[in-house]
Amino acid sequence: MQPLGDGALRFARPKTPGARELLERLRAWPRVTDVVLTTDHACIYFDPAAPPEDLTVALASWATEAQAEQREARLVTVR
């Protein structure tokens, strides 16, 4: 994570969850006021007087959840 001034953090966007779900989860995080996603990064904005809790644990758990939800690929042969 990289601080952007006193009221924002920028970090590499995880591959999972997807963009919409990541946006919703980050916006729901306590004390986050806004979120911006790009292809490679995410940025959260917050009141500098009340920064959010450490997001690294949450991001790691979301990635683990997504891996657990993935199903094994099936091979289907069509004649």
Image: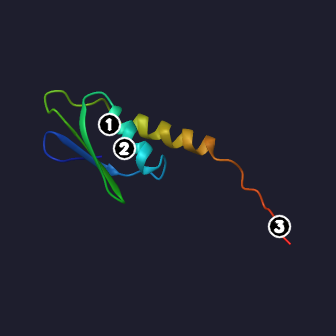
Secondary structure state at the residue bearing disc 3: loop
Residue at mark 3 to residue at mark 2: CA–CA distance = 37 Å
Q: How many marks?
A: 3
* Callout 3 crowding tier (Cα within 10 Å): few <14, some 14–19, many ≥20: few
Would residue 46 appear left or right of 13 to someone viewing this image? left
Q: Pointers 1 and 2 in contact (CB under 8 A)?
A: yes
Would residue 63 appear left or right of 12 to someone viewing this image? right
The numbered dot on residue 27 is 1
Q: If the image is split into quadrants, where does the C terminus sit? A: bottom right
Residue kind at label 2, given as amino acid type: Leu
Residue 76 drawn above or below residue 4? below
Residue at mark 1 to residue at mark 3: CA–CA distance = 43 Å
* Callout 1 crowding tier (Cα within 10 Å): few <14, some 14–19, many ≥20: some
> Which residue appears farthest toward the right when viewing the image?
79
> Which residue appears farthest toward the bottom when viewing the image?
79
Would residue 25 appear left or right of 64 to someone viewing this image? left
Which residue is tagged 3?
Answer: 77
Give the image quarter of residue 53: top left
Would residue 22 appear left or right of 54 to someone viewing this image? right
Q: Position of residue 56 (x, y in %)?
A: 38, 38
Which residue is tagged 2?
Answer: 23
